[in-house]
Image (cartoon, rainbow, N blue to C red):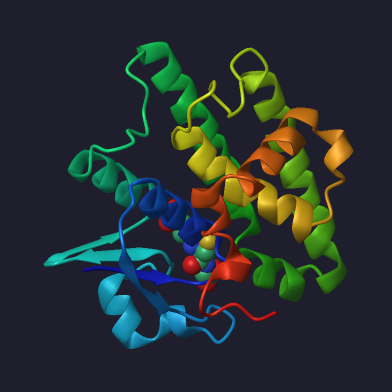
Amino acid sequence: MLKLYSYWRSSCSFRVRIALNLKGLKYDYIPVNLLKGEQSHPEFLKLNPVGFVPVLVDGDLVLADSLAIIMYLDDKYPQHPLLPSDIHKRAINFQATHIVSSSIQPLQNISFLNYIGEKVGPDEKLPWVQSVLRKGFTALEKLLKDHTGRYAMGDEIFLADVFLAPQLHAAFTRFNIPMNEFPIMSRLHETYNATPAFQEALPQNQPDALH
Ligand SMILES: N[C@@H](CCC(=O)N[C@@H](CS)C(=O)NCC(=O)O)C(=O)O
């Protein structure tokens, strides 16, 4: 049985949960409470020395980093491929994925926001996150406008969707970005909320969720 170390509100864990659901894979959910600092416990650091969730354990293989995990799952479980065969579409998928995973999420990570809160001031955290989200979403709207269908890259679900959905959820439900500012992002957010593999992966549907 696959084991996923996850935190309900972690957008990186949310990505992996979506991929596991799309592939129809069952897994053991092991909660790591980021607010209690469990990501820095020695036992967890043995799994991921960087001290971040998610971590996937598959037999002897311990994998950290959501993109590495999702690409591994895509290689091992070919059902519902996450990359299109068209190389241009693959490249745009990677570009959208990396806008989320490199140009947005690391700049709103808990440890980074705690640092801003301490060194700059607690009131500076939200405006900072909102500015990062607006910059990233402006780029994504431009990038995807000629590609979207029901989903980000047409009418099928691909890697870009797996990364976008958690970021949109965080932006619209936690960081108060008005949905009308980003029409494509808003439409995709609503579509994801109505798609079972994404719904089941939502933070509030996880065993460690605090309501
Ligand atoms: N590139 C990594 C980033 C992982 C990451 O930043 N995880 C966050 C949750 S989304 C975390 O564990 N944060 C804990 C902390 O900042 O201390 C991935 O995609 O898995």
**Horizontal and vertical percent for residue 106?**
56, 53
**Horizontal and vertical percent for residue 130?**
79, 50
Dividing the image into 4 quarters, which one contains the C terminus? Answer: bottom right
Taking the spot 69% from the left edge, 20% from the top edge, the residue there is 142
Q: Is residue 91 above or below residue 175?
A: above
Instruction: Classify residue 89 as left or right of residue 181.
Output: left
Instruction: Classify residue 200 as left or right of residue 25.
Output: right
Taking the spot 58% from the left edge, 41% from the top edge, the residue there is 164
Dividing the image into 4 quarters, which one contains the N terminus? Answer: bottom left
Towards the viewer: 175 or 152: 152
Please, which residue is most extreme toward the left here? 60
Taking the spot 58% from the left edge, 60% from the top edge, the residue there is 202
**Horizontal and vertical percent for residue 187?**
73, 34
In this view of the protein, can residue 21 be seen by the observer? yes
**Horizontal and vertical percent for residue 34?**
54, 78
Instruction: Classify residue 3 as left or right of residue 140.
Output: left
Taking the spot 67% from the left edge, 72% from the top edge, the residue there is 114
How many marks the image carries: the answer is: 0
In this view of the protein, can residue 110 be seen by the observer? no
Q: Quadrant of residue 103?
A: top right
Q: Is residue 21 above or below residue 207?
A: above
Q: Quadrant of residue 32?
A: bottom left
Towards the viewer: 133 or 185: 185
